[in-house]
Image (cartoon, rainbow, N blue to C red):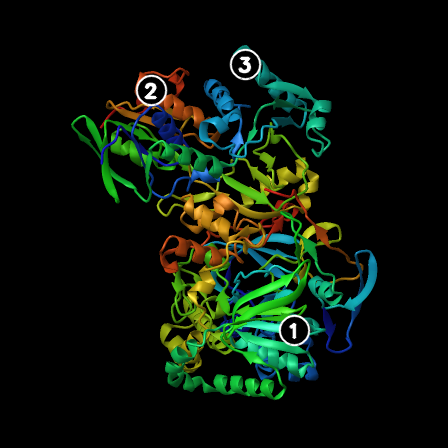
Amino acid sequence: MSAPRELVIIGAGPAGMAAASTAAGLGVDTLVLDQQPAPGGQIFRGIGQAGPAHLELLGSDYQAGAEQVASFVHSGADYQPDTAVWSLGADGELGILHRGKASLISARRVLIAGGAMERPLPFPGWTLPGVMNAGGAQILMKSSRLVPLDGVVIAGTGPLLILLAWQYMRAGVAVQAVLELAPRKNLWRAGLRLPAALRAGHYLTRGLRYLLALRRAGIRVTYGVSDLQAVGNDRLEAMTFHTGGREQTLETGNLLVHFGLVPGIQLTEAAGCHHQWDDGQQCWRPQADAWGNSSVDGIAVIGDGATIGGAVAAVHAGRLAGLEAARAMGHIDAAGRDRLAVDDRQWLQDDLRIRPFLESLHRLPDTLLSGIADNTLVCRCEEITAGEVRAAVRAGHRDPNQVKFITRCGMGPCQGRQCGQAVANIVAAACDRPVSEVVPFRVRPPLRPISMGELSMLETGNNTA
Amino acid sequence: MNADVVIIGGGLMGSSAALHLAMRGQRVIVMEKDSPGRHASGVNAGGLRQLNRHPAEIPLAVAAARLWRDIQSLVDSDCDVKLSGQVRVAENEADMRLLEERAARVRALGYEHEIIIDREQLYRLVPHLAPHCVGALYTRDDGFARPFHALTAFRHKAESLGVQYRTGSRVHEIARQGADWQVVTDRGCCSAPVLVNCSGAWSQALCSMLGEPVTINTGAPMMMVTDRLPHFLDPVVGAASRKLSFKQMQNGTVLIGGSHLANHDMKTETTAIDFIKLSESARSVVELFPHMRDAHIVRTWAGLEAFTPDHLPVIGPGSCAAGVFHAFGFSAHGFQLSPVVGLILSELILDGKSKLPIGPFSIKRFLDETATGCA
Amino acid sequence: MFRRLQTHQGKVVTVFVEGNDVRVPAGDSVAAVMLAMDLLPTRTTAVSGAPRAPLCMMGVCFECLIEIDGVANQLACQVQVSEGMRIRRQHAVGDPAS
């Protein structure tokens, strides 16, 4: 094994970039790995190629990325794009794949900034071509300037719905409807948390601005929607939903869904970090302290991969983690770290004030998470239905891992990323236990498939492989 | 709670024992510290292999093969058994010589299940093998099954005959209570005149509790599985001079094992894949099946197994007191034997002796190593 | 069905999609090219032959499995197009049922 790097950061999104800039600025030997060809993470995809018109279209949140990327590129941190991390050990050993070459590297400290993914939520017809994640469609727009040709329906819950609808509207895309699944009663609970959220009120005013713009453009936003269904044979032809007690149908070839974000936990699970179920965010997240330290010595996690906080919070958390890395590697002492951290700690706290409000507003009903219809596919890869999962529980397989063994749910290429939450929710409901007591799918390497040929040529930095 | 037999370990050995005992009217309780099949029984390579067994194991493996051929009538499930043979490939003349000697030894013991096949026969059986191989040792009715499904079938059948599984019940203490063994777990106790130890990688702890003089090592053999590939292989493939076990499942995925060991920690019951060693396996795969170069490895894992010093299992009565029986230490080749091990245990317990020869598996063979004997 | 927001000004490459040559922006992922050409479904599943298309565009759903330069099961949203690349939809790789 070649000599260990001091700090390896996985992910060049806002959190990773900020951590790298900070740590490298304090003299930490820093290497940033990212699977994309350019920095920016998911939120700033394509920012390197974005001309002024495109930046204008996508809005101010996106534009903020340009400066972060510039800062990162000049930070002195080593940066290796096109690099997938396929294994991560608690001892700081990483398996990476870069342009067809697999190798093992080691780090004294690993900072996981791999971000979040859109919550996978099965509903009837969700596997039809024509149904895509709203964030995925946004990535298409950011990195390839592709937008729906004909009409598009955007459905689900979360700030992304309104943002995307607004971006599409300005791009001349025919937004047929925006369907909000959050139950109306969420408004009351969220309302209680509104005062505390006002400290981060700019999010609220921006959201209202987008809503107003949509209204002026005649784009209908419908609340209290339920019973989403995608309909079609080989591809999406229409979608149905319930609102105000009635069923409605919209003919469309594009349905973009988004049910909120959840931390991507593959890396933290692989490293053996402790996770807990977060009831407010309705997902598992790794245990982490204010500096990003996980339950495993030498492994830290920040940004949306630690807790859903958004891009601005990620920058502050990244800076704090960069400072902590400098302290851990002996470049600064704890007092120096604390001194340098004062502003970011305050800004992070302020920024996160919006979260309880948003979490309440966009809280998904338990029935939506666990009451998936029997004949709806839960595991897309192996084509296992919710009914089969329930049958496995009835046959005595009472945790997700046992269900996986007997049904193959979670054994396909995505290794449970898309079905893990649904299986856990269904199993919990079937066993009459809270989902916080259910242990998620065990994660095993490789975290991304690597080929037999690539593994056979594994490089370790020694001359013998 | 009382029973006729308490079995420690809800894996395949324990479940097989439970089933055979229940079939003969015994009341059985199985104490399982996690969930049945959580460890080695659920995650092994699923190989049904008589080929290349230690001579002491051959009679058991041949008897087990008969049970696997008709597993449906034993456990009401076919366990996804596929018996399309196993080959042990010779890649050069030296390998071939070793295999021919082996075949002769097995024939001399009176068994016909291992035969030498030549180059032409080998490539008819395994057309996608790299072209340099010269022949193989072949067992026609070997194959594989799906371990967790098999375990589940054994368990369900056992439960239908009244066997009770206590899951989440780790054994802390074993005590004598008159003529009974009292087993204390963190979820309750039970007593029975007969105790069966099928605790797999945890058998050292159990043996210590029982005062048995044995040293068990633990190991975690690594496995990998690929994405689904078009069907190209029927027999299971091993090689004379490589650590490799290679099979294609009915669903197209390819399962690769071969006894390279992961790092593991018995305190936390975790394993960490050693990718340097695994890359050797990958090299073997690519050298024997060149088209596998582009196959994707989707998952790797390693199950916790018990290894005895001589890699032969312990099967038989305990050495210290009456009413104790053992079946552990299968050293990464227990799956195929499991149906017959349960039968043997039931015969030992109920008839005082087993029909199959189990002398070489006696726990007493370790008595010479320790001066103290029983605690 | 997707359209481009504006004419691409930068570098283009020629790739072969299902045997037909097409010029695409050099920064596109293979998945983006398939969606831009409306080649849905982009694959059919191994288990039942069901039609599928990219879902997440960020490498976590594994729906966009595509054959690239003769090798199956490539993650199209994580592969950037390059000159001469041969792209094919893949159908039911592996044995159906089970």
Q: Secondary structure at mark 3?
A: loop
Give the label on residue A408, or none.
none
Camera-side mark, 3 or 1: 1
The residue located at (55%, 88%) in the rendering is A209
Look at mark 1 in the image and give the residue it sits on.
A152
The subunit carrying tag 2 is B
Q: At which x and y percent is residue C17? A: 79, 59
Q: Is residue B186 left or right of residue A102?
A: left
- What is the distance, in whole Å, between disc 1 and disc 2 at their CAs? 71 Å
- Residue at left 35%, top 45%? B267
Please report, as a chain letter, where disc 3 is located.
Answer: B
From the image, tell me which residue sits under label 3: B111
Residue occupying the far front of the picture: A246
Nearest the eye: C58 or A245: A245
* Location of residue A122 with respect to A400 vertically, above or below: below
- Residue A98 locus on image (x, y percent): 63, 57
Residue type at tag 3: Tyr
How far apart in space, not on screen, are marks 2 and 3 (Cα)? 25 Å
Mark 1 crowd level (few <14, some 14–19, many ≥20, 10 Å Cα): many
Q: Nearer the viewer, mark 2 or mark 3?
A: 2
Q: CA distance from mark 3 to mark 1?
A: 70 Å
Image position, residue C44 (x, y; %): 68, 52
Chain where mark 1 sits: A
Q: Sequence-wise, which precedes: disc 2 or disc 3?
A: 3
Q: Is residue A271 visible?
A: no
